[in-house]
Amino acid sequence: MAIHENTLVLDVAPPRAKKRLFPMHLTPFENYMLMDDRPQYPMTFIVTFEFSGNLIRDEFTAAIDEALDRHPLLQAIIQPAKQNRDCWVDAKGLKPNVDWGEIDDPIEFDDGEFIDLRKEIGLRIWIRHDEQRAVVTTQFHHSVCDGIGSYQFLGDVLWYYARRTGDDVLDELPPFDDRVLRNRGRASFAAANYLNEAGKFSKEWAESARLLFWPMTALKRTRKPLMQRQAAVFPGIKSFIFDKEEHRDIRLHAQGLGQTPNDYLLEKLFVAMQRWDREQRIIPLPQTFAVMLPMDLREPGMQFPAANIVTYCFIRRRGRRLNDRDLLVRSLREEITQLKNTRHHTKFMNMIFGAHFYPRTLRTILSGNRCLATAILSNTGDPTKRFYVKLPREKGTLRAGNLTLEEVSGVPPIRPRTRASISIFTYRRRLKISIRCDPNFFDAADTQKLVDTYVSVIRDAMNS
């Protein structure tokens, strides 16, 4: 994409053009993630798959390589190229780091969690296994792809592994033309929605920036002596699982209130944040809480290699409004419905698209330690349903060759003063809450306490 004299022009190759994929300009969203990246708060997210079975190292390694061939952005780095602007370029043989170890070996870093996309592929993999279990932990840079893109890649890995280890009754993976990635920006940003009556890009993006990046309330640290704090071991995710019966009860309870399960869990998160805040403060203060929600922009039938086809929405509530449950339920339901209907025309995308062409402005917006959201909540659902093809299941549990997928966890990136990153999973018909707290601020016990607070709020409401 390019802008000339405030008029949007789309650089689109004609369908018959035989152009190579790289170099390729970053989309506004990819550029935003790159500019918000920093060593202490890298724009990376985590996905962990836990298996039963004896993982065969050579076959799994080969499956990773085969899957990578289908996802070009997982084989690219960022360098100045076309028009001397940052572009995705071929990494020329660089491969993601794959670290192998025994099942209980910790994950350690030479230079921290930060991934420098100018030198390194935006994917790291750690595999810990023995003859009965395997844990595959992955770290993706959000400039490369969103959570759904990561599941699609990992689904491909499991498909190739299954085929290599004896599953010959598998649907074929859909073929890709790599050049479809040139359309990823248009798929996540319908430019026509942001043009004014004169056909020029609206300047409302600056106003959107002021509204979106108004500082919110950050979660307070627990009052605990420094000597009692213990740093969380990467990835530092704590989880709680509601079983099938509890999950069903939550769905029915939400339905009785006119809520979807996702709306219900969002409402309870606001209540949990307020409870946490009150428990940590000696003197309660007026607060405004914000939850950032990733929203998928893929349309039915849309298939891309791993990429970002996503936007963010910010839901805000003043603390005093959380005391009126009927008002909270009704207002959240109405706001979420509106956001779903207008997700291709959000203030967030308007802001980052406009600011993409004013880099100094975007750097100013992202600089410092403003709390843009109290927490991030990703309603992931069943990630295996994002795979390109279905793999065999046994009693609801996915099987890939000689491996059985027992658990899934993961969380979005954490930025300054957003103390908690939360994902909701429904794999195997259970409801799983996974939370990672800011490792620079909270320790493992704090994270567990926040999980307990959230679960307690959900259960208290169910029993009231």
Image: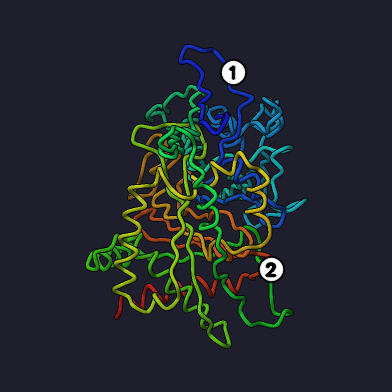
Quadrant occupied by the N terminus: top right
Front label number (2 vs 1): 1
Residue located 39% across and 32% down the image? 302
Residue at the extreme bottom: 282
Q: Left of 259 or right of it: where is 56? A: right
Asked if 67 appears above or below 175 in the picture, the reply is: below
Residue at the extreme right: 110
Viewer-side residue, 200 vs 79: 200
Image-quadrant location for residue 296: top left
Residue located 42% across and 74% down the image? 271
Amino acid on which the number 1 mark rests in the picture: Arg
Residue at the extreme front: 198
Residue 166 in sight: no
Where residue 173 appears, as percent x and y from the top left, is 42, 28
Q: Left of 188 or right of it: where is 129? A: right
Where residue 380 appears, as percent x and y from the top left, is 43, 52
Which of disc 1 and disc 2 is earlier in sequence?
1
Image-quadrant location for residue 354: top right
Amino acid on which the number 2 mark rests in the picture: Ala
Where residue 435 appears, as percent x and y from the top left, is 52, 63
Residue 284 in sight: yes
Q: Left of 402 or right of it: where is 335? A: left
**CA gap, disc 2 to disc 1?**
46 Å
Where residue 103 appears, as percent x and y from the top left, is 62, 54
Residue located 71% across and 28% down the image? 84
Secondary element at image label 1: loop
Residue to which mark 2 is pinned: 231
